Amino acid sequence: MKEKTNIILTGVGGQGVITAANILGKAAVRAKVNVFVSEVHGMAQRGGSVNCTVRMGRVTGPLAASGTADAILSMEPIESLRYIGYSNKNTKIITDITPVIPFTVSVGMEKYPPVDEVFKEIKNYAKLYKVDATKIARDAGAIITKNIVMLGSLAATEVLPFSKDILLETILENVPAKFKEINTKAFEGGFKAIKK
Amino acid sequence: MEIIESKPDETILLLGNEAITRGALEAGVDVATTYPGTPSSEIADTFSYIAKYLSKKSKKPPYYFEYSTNEKVALEVAAAASFSGLRSLTCMKHVGLNVASDAFMTYLYVGTRGGHVIVTADDPSCHSSQNEQDNRYFALFSGSPMLEPTTPQEAKEMTRKAFEISEELHSPILLRTTTRLNHARGAVKLKKPLKPREKGHFEKSPMLVTTPAIARIRHPELLKMLEKAEKISEKSEFNEIIEVGKPKDWGIVASGVAFNYVREAVDDLNLNVRILKLGMTHPLPKKMCKEFLSLCKKIIVVEELEPILENQFKALIFEIGCKVEIYGKSTGHFSRLFEYNPDIVIQALTKIFELKNPIKKPSKPILSLPNRPPALCPGCPHRATYYAAKKAQPKGVVYPTDIGCYTLGREKPLEMADLLLCMGSNAGTACGLAVATDQKVISFMGDSTFFHSGIPPIIDAVHHNHDVVITVLDNRTTAMTGHQPHPGTELDGMGRPAKKIIVEEVVKGCGVEHIEVVDPNKIKETTEAFKRALEFKGPAVVVSKSPCILLENRDKGKRGEDIYVYEIDQEKCRQCKICISRFGCPSFYYAEDGSIHIDDQQCNGCGNCTEVCPFDAIHKKGVRK
């Protein structure tokens, strides 16, 4: 097993970034792997860019150094590029393909770059995995399971120091009974999007 | 409710703030008080959730908890519980201790009976704050013992232990945290909670009445207490010397979250050093520190913000008369600004040890990425109030603002926040501007801020007849910090019915003669109200009442009511752009052809845009899916 595993989770407030980080943390505790999670609360949550860090193994704190991410899991294309400083050439960048247009763009103050150019640039720095998580989540039955789709994709990239099953068990333990089926579908859908 | 349902010895994932609450429960805390503020809020919110959860199950919560009117009141309520022999905890953000400091400074003279832990949550880098003051100075300033945790597990253990230390010393004790501890999650092993006492008894003593004569008796007692506290610090399990590799000349002193970065960097860089990890940082274990100095020729002090340990170590070196070199802020290797991170600590250590920095320069995106600054939510009633006030007097008005969501009114296109110091400062500075200038003044504060510290400046305005318009944005919650209740809400922090204080009744009671109570969603009427308030010579107060849209929509969801979204009739739209470039609701956007639309997913259905549009082009589209 690797000594340390660093995962960066990014997205926009309201996309379930913190929940996904929390689930990873709980799964690590379940797998008896040492873990720290850092979160963003307060003012930054109001519609802003959100990033969380999950660190596992021989680590003493929740923040990762630049260039040390094993994976960047992003719920939005440009948010993965925003935190590219954490990547190295082996970092697996898993991102949803659907942009969330910032307020600054919709009122014409700034421009959202073409998504293809975003992906092209990411490939210059790291390994890119694109996931249509929005579609998979909708097909699973609820768009809010997008973060669970992304966790399924993360499990498929084999960076986690515990099994896929432990992660799925942790997810199901944290959702109400009536949503278990939808979440399983979302998770498996995300997994299959990477491991065909 | 893992935090209370889990068995002792179980290990669960907890937020640093939740771990502090759990530590207090394990210590059998009787009374917990707060005024909410990031990054401290979840400590109190966890007390609140647990109380509501137990009440729902018809179980009695094992403690009394309240969101107090402000931090000073919170401290006083809990101090009285301590005087009555109960264990109490008060938590607040760093600047909250400024508000509570009047009570706090003399509290140290009086001392405690039941243990009292005061949590100060500092915010290096000002993630959600107006400054990054280092509250460790408050320990030195007041003479309070202080603990500083590094991880959630340690936060829980320190909180538990802090009650014991407080009782042993008969002194309140500070638990000083920073954002990266408050908002970090980690595995925490639980212990069995102690049974609380429920009711205490107040034994009268002349020593509790701090007249000058008594204060002169108590001050020497405070100094004696600190001597005793130093002995506790010498033996504290939270202070330790860690040897890494084969240490020779070098030592590192670290505390708080900075220790985490040091511990990992030392391993990653294969350094041979002794680390003095300080968890009880006031008073310092002088003997232990001197012993550490005797083992080293050079030491590096790694602490966020002010050089508090660094200066104390310089004094110790002077006392011993030894020649240990100190590296830290005074040598320029570390900054007094902002929070640290692994990059900063690794860079400084590699420079000091003359090693190659293993961290490559991080990649920076070449594409220019649009920002996502925080903004007032779609449907926020504050936007409507701001818009209406601006319509009443478009130019030449100064807008003092306050702490809360409405500071976001500073952003384009509203740009209606000109001056901000602290909680309640809107109205005080408004009075000052009325004295100092001939400019028109409209100030803004939230309802929770009004109760916290907004009332005294209104009284000042009335007494001196300052010509100001003071606005209270009454959205019936403390929104920015996570929708906590306040004296104007009908339920308290334990979920029990509470007497609701009405803002305009208080304002009337203060003697304000011109009061306008408006629903900001009626923009034209609100504009008229602001016009009347501006025309009135003397202090006028506008109370703008409309619930936070996030709470309103959540309640609608619970009641099974629909939320209607709006759309723009492209035939009627004349592209005047008022909706997007003057009102500035974030749910509006330009399509590629330049036409303006409303995003269904973002629209919260307030419908205020229908009133803003001069061409009647916006109407209800249908139910939000």
Image (cartoon, coloured by chain):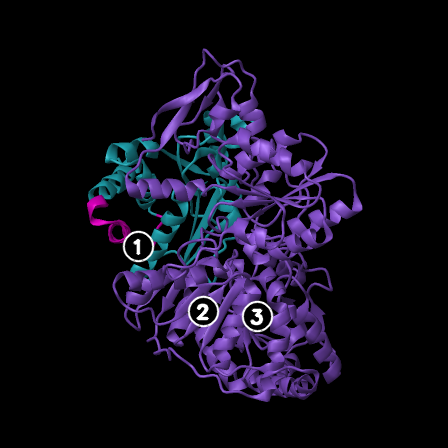
Chain colours: A cyan, B purple
Tell me residue B39's x, y (percent): 51, 57
Q: Residue at x 50, y 49 (%)?
A: B480
Q: Is residue A175 magenta?
A: yes
- At mark 2, the secondary structure is strand
- Quick one: quadrant of the N terminus of chain B? bottom left
Q: Residue at x 32, y 39 (%)?
A: A144
Label 3 neighbourhood size at 10 Å, few (<14), some (14-19), many (20+)? some
Q: Which residue is mark 3?
A: B272
Q: Which residues are magenta?
A: A159-180
The one nearer the camera, B484 or B141, is: B484
Tell me residue B483's x, y (percent): 45, 51
Chain holding disc 1? A
B568 to the left or right of B9: right
- At mark 1, the secondary structure is loop
Amino acid carrying mark 3 in the image: Asn
Marks 3,1: beta carbons within 8 A:
no
- Residue B372, can we see it? no
Q: Is residue B571 above or below residue B170?
A: above
Amino acid carrying mark 2 in the image: Ala
Query: How much space separates mark 3 and mark 2, taking CA atoms?
Result: 44 Å
Q: Main secondary structure of the magenta part?
A: helix
Query: How much space separates mark 3 and mark 1, taking CA atoms?
Result: 33 Å
- At mark 3, the secondary structure is loop
Q: Residue at x 41, y 36 (%)?
A: A128
Q: Which residue is mark 2?
A: B32
Q: Quadrant of residue B200?
A: bottom left
Query: How much space separates mark 1 and mark 2, taking CA atoms?
Result: 39 Å
Q: Earlier in the sequence, mark 3 or mark 2?
A: 2
Label 2 neighbourhood size at 10 Å, few (<14), some (14-19), many (20+)? many
The one nearer the camera, B585 or B522, is: B522
